Image (spheres, helix red, strand yellow):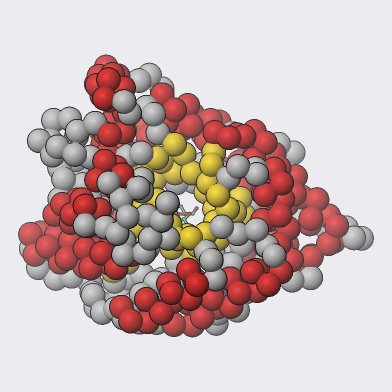
Amino acid sequence: MEVTRRESLVLGAGLAMGAAAQAAVPGTGLGESLNRAARRGGRRFGAAIGMGRPGHVEGAFADPQYRRIIASECGLIVPENELKWGWVRRSPTGFDFSGADRLLAWAEAHGLALRGHNLVWHHPKWWPDWVTNYDFGARPAAEAARLLGEHIETVCRRYGTRIRSYDVVNEAVAAETGAMRETVFSRAMGSADDVLDLAFRTARRAAPHAQLVYNDYMSWEPGNETHRTGVLRLLERMRKRGTPVDALGVQSHIGSGNNVGDPSVFGPHDERAWRRFLDEVTGMGYDLLITEFDVNDRGIEGDIATRDRAVADYARAYLDLMLSYRQLGDVLAWGITDNYSWLQQRPPRRDGLPKRPTPYDSEYRPKPLRTAMAAAFRGAVPRRA
Ligand code: 9MR
């Protein structure tokens, strides 16, 4: 994809200031970018971008307006799908890095870093069919370790120090029971913990420079207690086993219509329980990241202004709490304009209107959510040095 003239202007202006991602937001009168605001506390702001199916919500990368906002607001990006097994390993015989390569080249041309998402999505639903039906042969544990190890090493070695943070394992704890999910790999290897151990140890060897993250969607909303407890127990076990995990990725898909809870109600949350959870996680020596922030407004009634205000206030309370932790590092949104949000494909609102979960609307105009995010960054407790 060609870098447009507009993008090269943004890039040129940014480089003149020392870093493309710290430029003011061109054409918006917004002044400081979200990344610049985050940098005040020693953090970076980033967002997901996808080049999935053209014309589909995952195809944001094809949209120059989307790329322009990312280039001007962010210090890093994360590929929405292009590093998952579902893209990279569509067949057992090869690796397809075409999507991730293009995203990384574009990111580097704009002075942006790229996070790796993910090396192992430990959830039976998200493996390609050939993996689900794989014949692990007479020595299943050895074959599973070989296949996983080969995948992780190949990805990490390909990108070397160009990728400095990986979601090594994603969503291994079942939200409903708090138990570890079973997958073809956990069955072949004997236990899910063995899969995680192998994944993190292999990643540490193959990418010793990289931050290694366990990423999950436990949240501060009612209905998440079991999930949170399951994640805490997993983090404890990994510490005991010496599994090399640096940080917990808190996905932060907040709001109603989340994976658990009552989709018709917006807003209830338990700050005390959430703090207890974060205190336990950081008490074990883990750092924190916000990896997939968005606010599902499925359950908020009212006109656009009312909805946007409620989303902004809810986000502000959440981000203020998260940004009070010195252990919190980078903050990434799961999409930056509403029209490309994955939430548009989830159960619709009762009024049938599109959701408004991201900092920019579908006409690429900044929303109150963006203002709330910038204010939260400016008021943040600085990140631990
Ligand atoms: O937003 C992603 C969507 O485009 C994909 O179809 C889906 C399956 O690969 O994954 C979505 O991203 C998920 C992320 O990888 C892990 N946490 C939950 C995200 C939203 O479902």
Report the quarter where the N terminus lies: top left
Image coordinates of residue 52 in percent, x first then y, are 45, 40
The front one of 173 and 115 is 115
204 w.r.t. 222: above or below: above
**Location of residue 37 by image quarter:** top left
Is residue 133 at all visible to an observer of this figure? Answer: no
Q: Residue at x 72, y 50 (%)?
A: 202
Question: Residue lying furthest front in this view?
Answer: 385
* Left or right: 149, with 65 as reference point: right
* Left or right: 226, with 182 as reference point: left
Image coordinates of residue 254 in percent, x first then y, are 32, 66
Counting labels gives: 0
Image coordinates of residue 359 in percent, x first then y, are 22, 50
Q: Residue at x 67, y 49 (%)?
A: 204
311 w.r.t. 80: above or below: below
Image coordinates of residue 385 in percent, x first then y, are 42, 51
* Quadrant field for ligand 1: bottom left
Is residue 318 at all visible to an observer of this figure? Answer: yes
Q: Residue at x 90, y 60 (%)?
A: 139
